[in-house]
Image: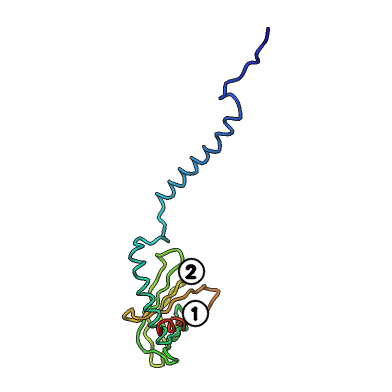
Amino acid sequence: MISHPTVRPWYKQRWPWFLMLGPALVLVAGGYTGYLATTRQDAVVVDDYYKKGKAINQDLRRDRAAASMELAFGARHDAAAGTLTGTLTGKGKPLATPFRIRLAHSTLPQKDMVLEAVPGPGGRFSARLPVLEQARWRVVVEGPANDWRLAGSWQWPQEQELALRADPVERAAEAK
């Protein structure tokens, strides 16, 4: 008489459970990722991509206008006094018109700030600037009518001084 060994049912064996562990972990991780995506707000994403895309051409015109005016911006932040002081020059001469300085935090939009700068008789300005968080700041200096802009980044506090200059390549592109 031939005896057949008894085969245990599949659910009592170790290998099927081990092989099902991978897909089960993927389902749990996917569920957790979905939970995070629906309960947390992503501050870096822009709401209206189309509107932002259309604004790019206007921004390029503003950059070209700054290049044709040969604008240069220099500033220094005095953390103890809570001020940002410096000059804005056009073609080597100080500009006396008021302008805006936008400081945008790299990841937290609630920390963004706008400073109104009014140059004095010598062309120097001083604007009140509260304590800055250590971060990379996106800096945009704009004219009062938004007709020109200088843009760049500033790594505070590693960089005590900030210098922005209009790109001469923009001026050459405008001449073509």
Residue position for label 1: 162
User: Who comes first in sequence, dot 1 or dot 2?
Assistant: 2
Tell me how far mark 1 sits from mark 2, CA to CA.
16 Å
Residue 144 lies in what quarter of the image?
Answer: bottom left
Q: Callout 1, which amino acid? A: Leu
Which residue is under mark 2?
133
Mark 1 crowd level (few <14, some 14–19, many ≥20, 10 Å Cα): some
Q: Residues within 10 Å of mark 2 (few under 14, many from 20)?
A: few
Name the outermost residue toward the left: 145
In the rendered image, the vertical position of residue 144 relative to residue 10, given as above or below: below
Pick the front one: 91 or 58: 58
Q: Quadrant of the C terminus?
A: bottom left
Image quarter of residue 21: top right
145 and 99: which one is in front? 145
State the SS at label 1: strand
If the image is split into quadrants, where does the N terminus sit? top right
Q: Mark on residue 103? A: none
- Where does the image place residue 86, in percent across and percent down from the top left? 45, 85
- Classify 27 as above or below 165: above
